[in-house]
């Protein structure tokens, strides 16, 4: 199947209003540099949605807008039917958690203390640190494999260890929606799979809605229940990976000639890039045709 009708961004104007998180006709920009115009997306409830696309296509920018980190210059982002920018920060933080692409820990903070900061949205004048908070922190560290690092300083850890600590903090926030910007950054292949397995468990067993930006299209196709493919700030296709991931779509979005086969482990789409020589021949063919026509 090609990435044709039924998956195109032109259908964005016909969206429902039942899902908890959506963007409506947003224009996203940094100063005067526009990244996306009139972009609409809706995150299906209880989905594991993954946003993919080439570098600088607007993936992380869209995630920042959905998480209230970037205010659209036009349009609006809705959370539970309210404009997210108008909601109190603590209310948003109890509903939506974010793992940003680059995070910097305060100097001299331990792993346990940093993960504990994920409980901040649940604190208040009448509710201070509790045994429940402690239980959640310990559970979050265990889930991400950093429990044995609890007393270590974060700035002593490797990049991969720090990434898992930040994920633990996001889990400790216990939000029904969790947004992750490149959560497998700095991780070796084993820990990449561990993190994505954990995300799948949060989605399947706890019913959380996850939205992640991933660079690895095969990981995205394996784990996502809903895929959004961006190019140039525009939704090119969206839907279940089995419905939209084709060689035509990969070439349109990424400019890569490939075959798409069934993953022998999961049956999900597996992108196999064309060999270098085959890609070279493909690039040379238009030039040959043009020369012969002249």
Image (cartoon, rainbow, N blue to C red):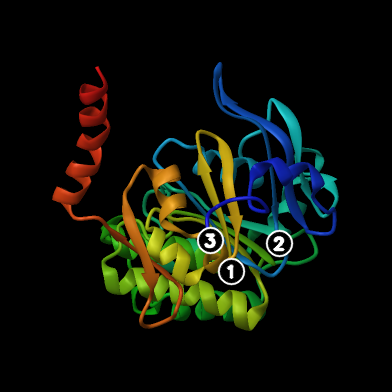
Residue 155, visible in the rendered structure: yes
SS for callout 3: loop
CB within 8 Å, label 2 to label 1: yes
Q: Nearer the viewer, residue 205 or 266?
A: 266
Quarter of the image with the C terminus is top left
SS for callout 1: loop
SS for callout 2: loop
Cα–Cα gap, marks 2 and 3 = 22 Å
Instruction: Find residue 225 and name its label.
Output: 1
Query: Please, is residue 132 above or below residue 2 in the view?
Result: below
Mark 3 vs mark 1: in front = 3
Q: Mark 2 sits on what residue?
A: 44
Instruction: Please name the residue shown 67% across and 57% down the image.
Output: 96
User: Residue 47's quadrant in the figure?
Assistant: bottom right
Instruction: Please name the residue shown 19% across and 50% down the image.
Output: 278
Q: Mark 3 sits on what residue?
A: 1
Instruction: Please name the residue shown 18% across and 42% down the image.
Output: 280
**Residue 183, percent from left and from top:** 43, 59
Q: Nearer the viewer, residue 41 or 251?
A: 251
Q: Left or right: where does residue 17 sit relative to residue 243?
A: right
Could you tell which of marks 2 and 3 lies nearer the N-terminus?
Answer: 3
Cα–Cα gap, marks 2 and 1 = 9 Å
């Amino acid at each position: 199947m090609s990435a044709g009708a039924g998956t195109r961004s032109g259908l964005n104007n016909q969206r429902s209003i039942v899902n908890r998180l959506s963007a409506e006709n947003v224009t996203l920009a940094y100063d005067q540099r526009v990244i996306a115009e009139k972009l609409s997306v809706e995150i299906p409830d209880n989905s594991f949605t993954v946003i993919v696309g080439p570098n600088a296509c607007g993936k992380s920018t869209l995630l920042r807008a959905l998480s209230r980190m970037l205010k659209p210059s036009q349009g609006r982002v809705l959370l539970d039917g309210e404009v997210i920018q108008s909601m109190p920060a603590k209310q948003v933080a109890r509903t939506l958690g974010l793992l940003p692409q680059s995070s910097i820990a305060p100097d001299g903070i331990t792993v346990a203390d940093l993960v504990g900061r994920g409980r901040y949205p649940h604190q208040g004048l009448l509710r201070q640190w509790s045994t429940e908070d402690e239980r959640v922190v310990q559970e979050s560290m265990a889930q991400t494999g950093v429990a044995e690092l609890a007393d270590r300083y974060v700035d002593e850890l490797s990049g991969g260890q720090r990434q898992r600590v930040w994920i633990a903090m996001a889990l400790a926030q216990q939000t029904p929606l969790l947004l992750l910007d490149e959560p497998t950054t700095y991780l070796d292949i084993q820990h990449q799979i561990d993190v994505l397995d954990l995300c799948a468990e949060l989605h399947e067993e706890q019913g959380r809605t996850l939205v992640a930006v991933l660079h690895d299209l095969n990981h995205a196709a394996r784990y996502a229940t809903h895929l959004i493919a961006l190019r140039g700030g525009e939704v090119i296709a969206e839907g279940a990976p089995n419905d939209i991931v084709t060689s035509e779509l990969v070439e349109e979005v990424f400019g890569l000639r490939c075959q798409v086969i069934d993953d022998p482990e999961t049956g999900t789409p597996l992108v196999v890039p064309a060999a270098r020589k085959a890609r070279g021949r493909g690039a040379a063919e238009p030039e040959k045709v043009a020369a012969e026509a002249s």
